[in-house]
Amino acid sequence: MPAERLTALQDDLVLAPAQLPRWNAFADATQAMGKGMGMMQGSEIAEDMPMYSGTATQRGMPMPRSDHGAMMGQAGSLLERLDPHQSMLTAQLDAVRKVKSAPSPLSSALTLAQTAKFDAATNCGPRRL
């Protein structure tokens, strides 16, 4: 979730000081996920995947190159070509797990009205977080 959306949601929720530590944990986890996904584009993982360009991005994720790289005749065995994909997906799964664990403590600290606003604002699927 972009910092602007987090700030707007925090303002909309009108959090009490006692709720802020749980909010901060949620905000930190969602921002870390976004940064982690964006950092992957220039990482060794992305560089090891010839099918992705290290500079072409959309929402911080590598975009497929037109030559289809590793899947279309690049050197190396199938297993060698799949290793970077597995590493990328593992990193994505780890990031999702961190984000998934953050809303539960926050939700238990919110009032019913705050919970309704939070659910409405975050009910956009995982790509919107």
Image (cartoon, rainbow, N blue to C red):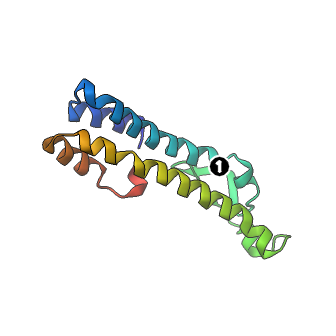
Picture layout, residue 18 above or below residue 37 = above
Picture layout, residue 115 above or below residue 88 = above
- Quadrant of the rendered structure where residue 76 is? bottom right
Residue occupying image coordinates x 16% and y 40% = 111
Hey, which residue is sitting farthest right in the picture?
75
Residue occupying image coordinates x 32% and y 56% = 124
The total of numbered circles placed on residues is 1
Picture layout, residue 15 above or below residue 29 = above
Q: Position of residue 52 (x, y in %)?
A: 68, 59
Looking at the rendering, in which quadrant would you find the N terminus? Answer: top left
Would residue 108 be found to the left or right of residue 51 on screen?
Answer: left
Check disc 1 and report the residue beneath it: 41
Q: Position of residue 71 (x, y in %)?
A: 72, 73
Name the residue nearer the viewer: 21 or 50. 21
Residue occupying image coordinates x 34% and y 38% = 5
- Quadrant of the rendered structure where residue 80 is? bottom right
Residue occupying image coordinates x 56% and y 48% = 37
Would residue 41 be found to the left or right of residue 98 on screen?
Answer: right
Q: Position of residue 51 (x, y in %)?
A: 70, 64
Q: Position of residue 68 (x, y in %)?
A: 70, 69
Residue 56 seen in the current view: yes
Would residue 51 be found to the left or right of residue 125 on screen?
Answer: right
Residue 62 seen in the current view: no
Could you tell me the amino acid type at mark 1? Gln
Name the residue nearer the viewer: 14 or 54. 14
